[in-house]
Structure formats: C-alpha cells, structure tokens
Image: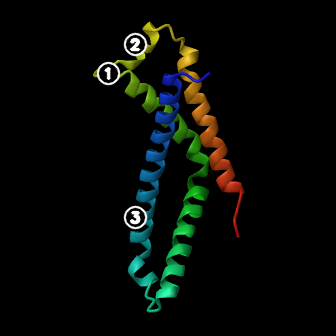
Amino acid sequence: MIKIFDRYLFKKMIVTFLVIYVVLFIIFFLIDNVANKIEEMHKINDFKLFVEDRLVYLDYYVLYFNRLLGSLFSFFIFLAASNVLYSLDNASSRELIALKTMGASSARIIAPLVMGAIVISFALTAFREIRVE
C-alpha cells in the first residue's frame, strides 16, 4: 500500500530530475546553437521543408544530448535525490523531522527515492535503446 508521503516523495523526485534534465538540455541547446551559428543553418523558403527540417533538428539535439551526457545521468539522479532530501530538511518546512516523528524509518523515507531512481533509469534506458525509424 502506497502511503501519501511515498507518492509525494516519488513525485518530487521525478519532477526534480525533469527540471534538471530540461535546464541542462536548454543550456546545451543554446551553447551549441551559438557555437554553430544557427542563422546560417536554416535558410529555407518552403514551409513544408521548414517544418520537417525543424523536427529533424530537434530530434538531432535530443539524441545528441542523450549520447553526450548519457554517462552523467546517474549523477543527475543522485543530484535530484539529494535535492529532494535537502528540500525536506529545509529550515522553513522541516518535513523530514515530521516524517521521523511519525515513526517512519530512514529506509521507509529513502524507498520512494530509490523507486524514482529506478523508474528514471528504466525510462532513460528505454529512450536510448528504442529507436523509432
């Protein structure tokens, strides 16, 4: 049976990782575009080619980003879990102390974070291995 705080911690772990992933993707996208002078890459007058070219362009960046930073995803998962635990023990909320006083063990608190890390790992592995052509 999943308790309320298990769902809360699991959701917080997934959202924190997605925020880290999206911010790093945007930074990567901007740096690569500045380095490769995007204004010279896309000078197309036909709208159909323009739309198709943009989709290929985005697909290139998603796959290239995952290939380039794929070995660092375990660090990003650890960073997300650390951020969740830090935000639980923040001076303003003290949610971690409330969980401990309710009788939750440390293993019970960490279990949703481990489950979130497993789900993120499976999703990233599936994204990397399953190619739609």
Residue at the image point whose x is 40% and y is 24% from the top: 88
Q: Please name whichever residue, 127 or 28, is drawn nearer the observer in this view of the structure.
A: 127
Q: Residues within 10 Å of mark 3 (few under 14, many from 20)?
A: few
Q: Quadrant of the C terminus?
A: bottom right
Among numbered discs 3 and 1, the one appearing first in the sequence: 3
Residue at the image point whose x is 53% and y is 25% from the top: 6
Give the residue type at disc 2.
Answer: Ile
Q: Residues within 10 Å of mark 2 (few under 14, many from 20)?
A: few
Give the residue type at disc 1.
Answer: Ser
Q: Which mark is residue 97?
A: 2
Question: In the visual, does 50 lie left or right of 63?
Answer: left
Farthest residue in the bottom direction?
A: 45
Question: In the visual, does 70 lie left or right of 94?
Answer: right
| Label tally | 3
Q: Which mark is residue 93?
A: 1
Give the CA distance from mark 2 to mark 1.
Answer: 9 Å
Q: Please name whichever residue, 45 or 103, is drawn nearer the observer in this view of the structure.
A: 103
Residue holding disc 3: 30
**Residue 9 on image: x %, y %:** 49, 28
Q: Which mark is residue 109?
A: none
